[in-house]
Image (spheres, helix red, strand yellow):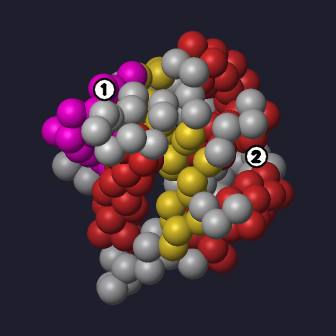
Amino acid sequence: MNVMAIAGRRIDADDAEQARFPLAKAPDVRREITRIMRETETEAVVCSAACGADLIALDVARELDIPAWVELPFDRERFRQTSVMDRPGDWGRLFDELVDQAEQAGRLNIIAPTDDSNHEAYSLTMDAILDRTMALAHEDNAASVGYMTALVVWDGASRGPNDLTAAFLERARLRGIPVRQLLT
């Protein structure tokens, strides 16, 4: 099975000091994600559901009739408030639709961390995305590994040691998952 793990930048806040993923770039990113999924013949997508790269990728997967697994660090409402509704754009309805769809299909996983640290919860979610990607790639035939790729949608520059997108890229590489980068 061709499985794509996806992580990336959220849409920039209105008061962002540096542009990393402006809302105006969302249609371009959507076109490129569509092209990449078609080009790689993606058969399954695994990601979280934050506004920006995640929700765009999940919506493209839905449009292309590709099953998608959603990994959330904590309960839906908390995630919706802290990672979806806090940025410009109409992301709430899309989040609800896509997460409902994943839940109804049995493809929603809530990590439920043991502490209240957002950073730790998101770090655990990155590992869950990569773990599920590897498990799905092995699912059809234990004797051979399916194709896996990690798509990192970002500006190409780390924000420092707490940059989870940069960490996702590195963790995918350490697991031997080929990485593609889509610049915002």
Classify 10 Å Cα crowding around label 2: few (below 14), some (14-19), many (20 and above): some
Residue 146 position in % (x across, y down): 39, 32
- Element on which disc 2 rests: loop
Q: Is residue 45 magenta?
A: no
Q: Nearer the viewer, mark 1 or mark 2?
A: 1
Position of 40 with respect to 92 (left or right) is left
Can the viewer see residue 20 in this picture? no
Label 1 – label 2 distance at C-alpha: 31 Å
- Residue 99 sits in which quadrant? bottom right
Residue range in magenta is 163-180
Residue drawn at x 66%, y 76% as measured from the top left: 77
Residue drawn at x 52%, y 19% as measured from the top left: 40
Name the disc covering residue 34, or none. Answer: none
Q: Is residue 15 above or below residue 145?
A: below
**Mark 1 or mark 2: whose residue is earlier in sequence:** 2
Residue drawn at x 39%, y 28% as measured from the top left: 147
Q: Is residue 168 magenta?
A: yes
Classify 10 Å Cα crowding around label 1: few (below 14), some (14-19), many (20 and above): some
Under mark 2, the amino acid is Gly
Can the viewer see residue 57 in this picture? yes
Residue 113 position in % (x across, y down): 37, 79
Residue drawn at x 74%, y 67% as measured from the top left: 104
- Element on which disc 1 rests: loop
Residue 105 position in % (x across, y down): 70, 62
Residue 57 position in % (x across, y down): 62, 37
- Residue 124 sits in which quadrant? bottom left
Name the disc covering residue 89, or none. Answer: 2
Question: What residue is shown with label 1?
Answer: 178
Q: Main secondary structure of the magenta part?
A: helix
Position of 156 with respect to 8 (left or right) is left
